[in-house]
Image (cartoon, helix red, strand yellow):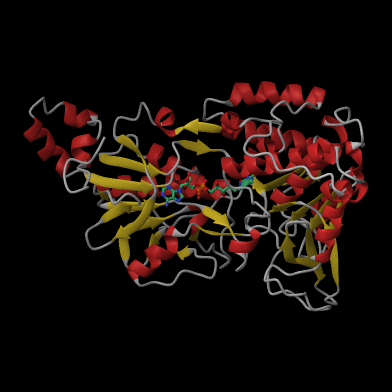
Amino acid sequence: MRPPCGGVWRLEANARPAREVLSVGADPTLEEAHVAHRNKVVIVGGGFAGLYCAQGLRRSPVDVTLIDRRNFHLFQPLLYQVATGALSAANIAAPLRGVLGRQRNAVVLLGEVSDIDPAARAVVLADGDRVPFDTLVVAAGATHHYFGHDADWEPIAPGLKTVEDATEIRRKLLSAFERAERAPPEARKRLLTFVVVGGGPTGVEMAGSVRELARHTLRRDFRFFDPADARVVVVESQPRVLAGFHEDLSRKAAAALDRLGIEVINDSRVTAVAPDHVVVTAKPDGSTRRIDTETVIWAAGVKASPLLSRLAARLGVEADSSGHLSVAADCTVSGHPWLFVIGDCATFRGEDGKPLPGVAPVAMQQGRYVADAIDRRARALPPPGAFRYRDKGSMATVSRSQAVVDLGWVRFGGKPAWLTWLFVHILYLARFENRVLVLVQWAWNYVSRNRAARLITGELTSVSTDARHDARRTDRTCQTADGALPAENADGEAQAGATSGRPGATG
Ligand SMILES: Cc1cc2nc3c(=O)[nH]c(=O)nc-3n(C[C@H](O)[C@H](O)[C@H](O)COP(=O)(O)OP(=O)(O)OC[C@H]3O[C@@H](n4cnc5c(N)ncnc54)[C@H](O)[C@@H]3O)c2cc1C
């Protein structure tokens, strides 16, 4: 539906009327007059933060408009299962219209917010439409951070943030095995080497899944090589994997990775990414090594959605080096009480002065808190106290039946940790419609080690069986992404290999 005039949405006219409005009767003038003084709350982003905020406002005397560039809410913690063919995308996504369908004071708009006009109190969509607001909640999440190498590294080393990312990674992984079936030995070795940049929770779970895919799921699928020979390498810039966790748990995770046959290179950064290799530079002595590979998965860092820098410029405030906006104790931007910024795109400092981690429970709790704050304003009640994050613990999964859990008062690993991880993730999914399907599929995958969703979609990467192809590629050895030869013993400026902004999957 197009805006009635001048590209400006009159949301009070388009919104499904709230219960109070219906009681006014059918007179449209009266209805508009009544609705006009209800607070118009616009929420940008239907991720954990935005969706929990919208749902928290279901009984509030406000009109809620949720805008997202996707028409679904995505359960990102299970994206790696899509990337490795264990689940299909529909299993971990829920249509926003379905989730908010019964919420009478909420409208969902599909659109990309490209700008915000603070003076006119309107958000601007990419197609030029404007949506007015009284209160704005920005919950636009985060995106990958290639530390200044976005243009050259991103196309080669996809990160894992969206459904498109997951299907692209799945395509690359499965294509590599397919191409290995008719490749000469050198090329096959390169095709069967998989590099995961970043040894945080996302990197560790990706590496574990890739190894399991190779070792179990695909074990009978190929005739000219043994998929179990696939090499999986994790590059981590910190001295240990899962650096955000207690050392005991890092050690347990490292032992589990070792048992799976995954090679971990700690204290090192990826300083060059090319279509057929990466260069890894050791932090202590600057020595470099080249790893031939055509499949690099980026799990090394995140930055706030680009919308935040635009917003910061409009407000004349500074975003931090990763584009996050700092917020006050009530999740508003100082001096702008109409603007809340929550979830992965905000920097909220806890009582210890450290920024809260970019994890789902922070986003959900902030979403609920902001809903309460807006509701109180609408009812002229005193504001709630400062936002306080209730940290219920952290967890990370390594492989089928291996995980680590830190609940603060107890830390454990192995199968009990994996069952805890499974239970918590199913509980989260339970808010949405997919839980039974996912549970059944998981149970089946667990018993059979099957990954039924291992489809290659998109364009097939060409299969070269020509040995000369290898020689040509070898000529381009050790070029940095800028095309220069990396200096021996030089430490790269890129943070590649750093743990992602997610210290742990939190329970
Ligand atoms: C692979 C992966 C695994 C993870 N695993 C875990 C885990 O196990 N446990 C855990 O606690 N956390 C995990 N996280 C982190 C967790 O998913 C995030 O902290 C959480 O999703 C943040 O919620 P959010 O609402 O701030 O952002 P998001 O969930 O990213 O939502 C942002 C929304 O904004 C929309 N959007 C962005 N820009 C615009 C725009 N300009 N216009 C319109 N819409 C826009 C997006 O489409 C998206 O729907 C994981 C993250 C990833 C990527």
Compared with 58, 461 (above or below) is: below
Q: Position of residue 185 (x, y in %)?
A: 92, 47
Q: Residue at x 52, y 29 (%)?
A: 432
Q: In terms of depth relative to the viewer, which is nearer, 381 or 269?
A: 269
Left or right side of 291 for 480: left
* Relative vertical location of residue 30 with respect to residue 161 in this rendering, above or below: above
Q: Quadrant of residue 427?
A: top right
Q: Is any part of residue 382 visible from this angle? A: no
Q: Give the residue displayed 17% in from the left and 39% down from the top.
A: 35
Q: Quadrant of the C terminus?
A: top right
- Whether residue 39 appears in this view of the structure is yes
Residue 501 on image: x %, y % = 62, 58
Tell me which residue sits at (37%, 69%) in the image. 313
- Point out the image quarter for the N terminus: top left
Instruction: Measuring from the top left, give residue 278's x and y in whole percent.
Output: 78, 61
Q: Is residue 282 above or below residue 369?
A: below
Q: Nearer the viewer, residue 269 or 273?
A: 273
Q: Is residue 270 above or below residue 443?
A: below
Residue 102: x, y in percent?
36, 26
Indicate the quadrant where residue 149 lies: bottom right
